[in-house]
Image: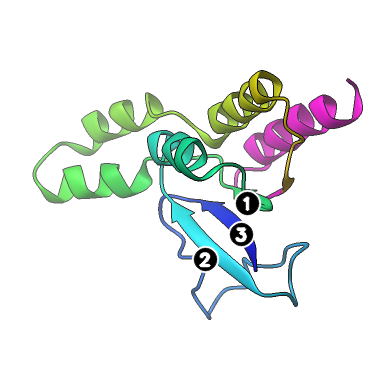
Amino acid sequence: MEKLLWLDDCRDPKDTETDWIIFSCLGRDVEIHWVKNYEEFINYIKQNGLPDGINFDHDLGEDVAREKVKNGMSKRQARIQKRETMSGFECAKWLIDYCIDNKKELPTWSSHSANPVGRDNINNILFNFKYKK
């Protein structure tokens, strides 16, 4: 069974109302591990090694910001804190360092981010590492 690491703070990878799992491992047995932030992302890989595939979101922290507003924080303050949250791009940079340090090949990846600039940044940095060594 292949393992897919799903990085997204809000979107459930198993939500049947979306088509987020349009990924290279479609049609195979896939075990999906959902991580919602930078810390969970690096902890998963440190504890379990590299998965067969990773699907990246760029903008992380929306779930935390919503909860803080719900608990009384101003929307302005929550937005400020959200901007300080590590993004999927930082996860991709960490992944490259991990692969270099551990002499590992980069796993298959995709980005489902609704942020087109963030999605392109993730794909470009990973593509450059994989194909321009």
Q: Which residue is at the front of the view, 2 or 35?
A: 2
Q: Nearer the viewer, mark 3 or mark 1?
A: 3
For mark 3, what is the residue?
3
The local crowd at label 3, few if under 14, some if 14 to 19, many if 20 or more residues have their Cα within 10 Å, is: some
Give the SS element for disc 2.
loop
Residue kind at label 3, given as amino acid type? Lys
Residue 55, labelled with which disc?
A: 1
Q: Nearer the viewer, mark 2 or mark 3?
A: 3
Residue kind at label 1, given as amino acid type? Asn
Alpha carbon of mark 2 to alpha carbon of mark 1: how far? 10 Å
Give the SS element for disc 1.
strand
Magenta extent? 109-133
Which residue is at the far bottom?
16
Residue 126: image x %, image y %? Answer: 75, 32
For mark 2, what is the residue?
13
Q: In the rendered structure, are the residues bearing label 2 and label 3 in contact, judged by CB atoms less than 8 Å apart?
A: no
